[in-house]
Amino acid sequence: MSKLRATLIDVGWGDSVLLQSQDSTGTDYYALIDSNDTATLRSSYIFLKRFFEKKGLTVPSATPIFEWILLTHAHADHGQGLKKILRDFGTRRFWYSTPANQPAFFADLLRYANRSSRVGQYDVVDTSKILPSFGPASLQVMWPRPGNILPNENNNSVVLAITLGQLSFVLTGDAEADAVWTQVAAQIPKNTGFFKVPHHGSANGTFTATGTTPWLNNISKTTKVAISSHLRPFSHPDPKVISALSAHTPTYRTDEHYHVTIETDGNQVEVSYSHV
């Protein structure tokens, strides 16, 4: 039986999501979205190292562990930990959105990807790109559109739909309601079984300036939702967002449930969480 898993790693602040796709023969494929690690705080790195060593894989690895690694957008709380992960875990593909500016960590990432044997192909992704299959799952970029580089870096976030069988997972980066969800909410797959709440559950990720909730209006009440919280220093998630999500009980949060794993066999969705 094929499976798709997404684990929102409890990194304390920022984002890091481990993805695992398993085909009917039991072969596993791995991917990673974002890492906020610093030189002194390596929450995602430590989680990943323990995860793969439990599976008998040595880290640093001799061959690439990841099929792909995605930087959703060029903010440090999403990407500053990726260089060490690229170096020690390796990836066949490194994807990213085109930033409005090039912060130092992002420029360093591209230089590393260009010269390192630990990174295979690397490229910008947008809605014009057809991405390869992720094991038995398929990938679709919902945002950004080609050439549409916005001054607010959050709104250059890659929004990715991953589909296995009858169900889809939607991963959202920090895409905000006014600039992104007013345009693409209607494209959210009707079969979405899991939706990652945008921008750590901040108000601007869910509410437009006029108070509407575009993405929330376009997912089913049975869709599982989860938040990569960002308590320091921004106090995300916002209580107004938690209240708006009251129909989706429970709303899973990394600040309350720690590492949150959403799994599907393509027909139903299960959620689990743990401290380790």
Image (spheres, grey):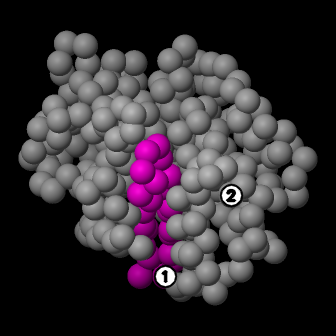
Q: Quadrant of residue 110?
A: top right
Name the residue: 47% across, 24% down.
Answer: 155
* Residue at image mark 1: 24
- The amino acid marked with disc number 1 is Ser
Q: Is 122 situated above or below 66?
A: above
Q: Quadrant of residue 6?
A: bottom left
Q: Nearer the viewer, residue 35 or 191?
A: 35
SS at mark 1 in the image? loop
Q: Gap in Å between the C-alphas at discs 1 and 2?
A: 28 Å
The image shows residue 146 at horizontal and vertical percentages of 60, 24
Secondary structure of the residue carrying numbered label 2: helix
The x and y percentages for residue 48 are: 57, 67
What residue is shown at x 9% (from left), y 47% (from top)? 247
Q: Is residue 123 above or below residue 50?
A: above
For disc 2, the neighbor class at 10 Å (few under 14, some 14 to 19, many from 20) is: many
Of the 4 image quadrants, the one containing the C terminus is bottom left
Residue 23 appears in view: yes
Look at the image and give the residue range highlighted in magenta: 1-24
- From the top left corner, tell me how far across and down residue 62 is, in percent: 81, 74
The image position of residue 104, as x and y in percent, is: 73, 30
| Front residue (pair 137, 68) | 68
Q: Say whether residue 11 is magenta.
A: yes
Quadrant of the image containing the N terminus: bottom left
Question: Looking at the image, which is closer to me, 222 or 71?
Answer: 71
Say above or below: 23 vs 184: below
Number of the label disc, if any, that sits on residue 40: none
Mark identifier at residue 85: 2
Q: Quadrant of residue 256?
A: bottom left
Q: Is residue 34 above or below residue 250?
A: above
Task: Give the residue type at disc 2.
Answer: Ile
Asked whether residue 144 appears in the rendered view, the answer is: no
Return the residue found at the far front. Answer: 40
